[in-house]
Image (cartoon, grey):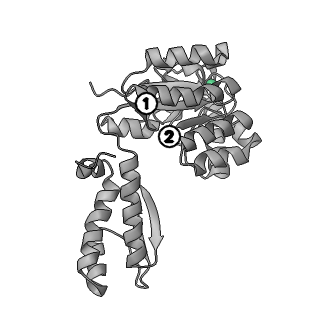
Amino acid sequence: MNRRYPFVKVILFSGVILAVIVGVGISSVKGEQVMARLAEMGVKQSYDDSFKIKLGGETIEVSGVDEFESQVNKNIEQAEERDLTGKKLVALTFDDGPEVDSTREILETLKEKQVKATFFMLGIMVQRFPDVAKEVVSEGNEVETHSMRHANLSQMSWDEAVADLTEAKQITRDITGVEVEALRPPYGATNDMVKDVASMPMITWSVDLYDWRDRDAGLIKDRVVNASYDGAIILMHDIYPETAKALPWIIDELRERGFEFVTVKELAGKKGIELKNGEIYRDFTTS
Ligand SMILES: [Zn+2]
């Protein structure tokens, strides 16, 4: 690991920066001073020595200073592992699931290769395979909605579209605990009505691997290598075994070519793009 510029790595993770500053404070002050210091840093704590701190985007409760310091160190290590400096960034996205075998195989690959992806789930599939949907979330992936039943929202009446998206969001929330924040409209089909009804950022894609049409791992591989670029959103489907089979190769090959993987919301953040309701995003390029 390149340790010449540790701070550059740390800068990527504002939560960690906060933790580092607080951590330094803790090693030099005690008791009430620690509390005062934490309050000053905006870190919530209670009076029973139990701290609630925000590290790397997660809220963690620790029982004391030792545990706090070990959490800080762990988060710095994780930040270093996911060093994105100088990398071309892409978001891998999976639609139409969750399924059982293919989604789980994809989750295994993502875990093994330390990649987080974005899953645009269908409400009916979340209902059908709730355990898999929960696994996608617990592995740290981003979950968004792809509507309830994959019907074309742009051909619905206002009331039908409202009913569809309300149900999809409700089911995803009830089963996975995730409040979805983005819509991938089925078929990428949108119009002014869909924009208004969705009232969320709409994420389409810029690299289509046509895995749904060809069901051919070889073709999927050629396409991903030829079409990927910094800021691209790559469309795949986690319901096909061919896609699951191609994924390890896709990740290795793109890494070989200087790419690293982030979720859709992370990609927007890294590129300095603030997601707006009703806007359509096919990629996130800085220019
Ligand atoms: Zn779809």
204 sits left or right of 39 in the view: right
Disc 1 crowd rating (10 Å Cα; few below 14, some 14-19, many 20+) is: some
Count of labels shown? 2
Residue at the right extreme? 128
Q: Looking at the image, tell me whether mark 2 or mark 1 is earlier in sequence order.
A: 2
Report the residue marked by disc 1: 255
**Above or below for 62 versus 32:** above
Q: Quadrant of the C terminus?
A: top left
**Label 1 is placed on what type of residue?**
Arg
Cβ atoms under marks 2 and 1 closer than 8 Å: no
Taking the image in four quarters, ligand 1 sits in the one at top right
Residue closest to the eye, 255 or 260: 255
Residue 83 can be seen in this image: yes
Residue 81 percent location from the top left of the image? 40, 48
Q: Classify mark 2: residues with Cα within 10 Å, few (<14), some (14-19) or many (20+).
A: many
In front of the other: 30 or 4? 4
Instruction: Determine the residue located farthest toward the front in the rendered image.
Output: 1
Indicate the quadrant where residue 219 lies. Answer: top right
Location of residue 64 (image quadrant): bottom left
Who is closer to the viewer here, 14 or 159? 14
Q: Which amino acid is tagged 2?
A: Val
- The circle drawn on residue 115 is 2
In this rendering, the label closer to the viewer, 2 or 1:
1
Task: Judge from the rendering whether residue 27 lies leftward or rightward of residue 193; answer left or right.
Answer: left
Above or below for 215 versus 127: above
Q: Is residue 63 left or right of residue 272?
A: right
Q: Judge: label 2 CB < 8 Å from ligand 1.
A: no
Could you tell me which residue is drawn at 28 percent across and 69 percent down? 22
> At 69% from the left edge and 41% from the top edge, which residue is drawn?
126
Tell me which residue sits at (74%, 42%) in the image: 129
Disc 2 secondary structure class: loop
Q: Secondary structure at mark 1?
A: helix
